[in-house]
Amino acid sequence: EEPDADPCSVWSVFDGPRPSTAGAREGLQIVFAPSADQWIVRRVRQAPEPEALAVVSADRQLAERCRHAGAAVVSPKDFIAHCGVEPA
């Protein structure tokens, strides 16, 4: 089951089944899917305004598919810099 979309939410999508220890975090939607890439691309394609979405990924194939579907793509490095967090 997919969580309801919040226009200002952050989603983290992982491959595989949900572990029993997975917990929710405020402001973060956590999704486990058989294929995280397919789930992300499907969400972008189904979005009423895909140009309002930003996908954070270093995966070039996923990035291209998301761009083609209308979303912006941000590198993890640029995302972290935008958040004002110092890389470890």
Image (cartoon, rainbow, N blue to C red):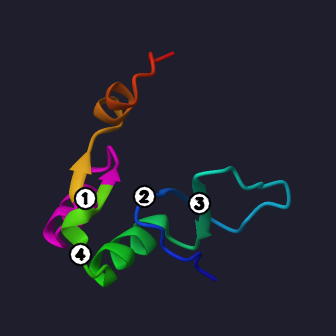
- Return the mark for residue 49: 4
Residue 41 image position (x, y, % from top left): 33, 72
> Which of disc 1 and disc 3 is earlier in sequence?
3
Residue 1 image position (x, y, % from top left): 64, 83
Q: Which of these two is toward me, 70 or 64?
A: 70
Task: Give neighbour class at mark 3: few <14, some 14-19, many 20+ (Cα, 10 Å).
Answer: some
Mark nearer the viewer, 1 or 2: 2
What is the CA distance from the residue labelled 2 to the residue labelled 4?
13 Å
Task: Give neighbour class at mark 1: few <14, some 14-19, many 20+ (Cα, 10 Å).
Answer: few
- Return the mark for residue 7: none
Residue at coordinates 45% horizontally, 21% vertically from top-left?
A: 85
Which structural element holds mark 1? Answer: helix
What span is colored magenta in the figure? 55-71
Please, what is the three-letter code of the amino acid marked with disc 4?
Glu
Q: Which of these two is toward me, 63 or 86?
A: 86
What is the CA distance from the residue labelled 4 to the residue labelled 1?
21 Å
Residue pointed to by mark 3: 29
Which structural element holds mark 2? Answer: loop
Q: How many marks?
A: 4
> Which of disc 4 and disc 2 is earlier in sequence?
2
Which structural element holds mark 4? Answer: loop
Residue 39, compared with residue 18, is above or below; it is below
Residue at coordinates 85% horizontally, 61% vertically from top-left?
A: 20
> Which of disc 2 and disc 1 is earlier in sequence?
2
Residue pointed to by mark 2: 8
Please, what is the three-letter code of the amino acid marked with disc 3?
Gln
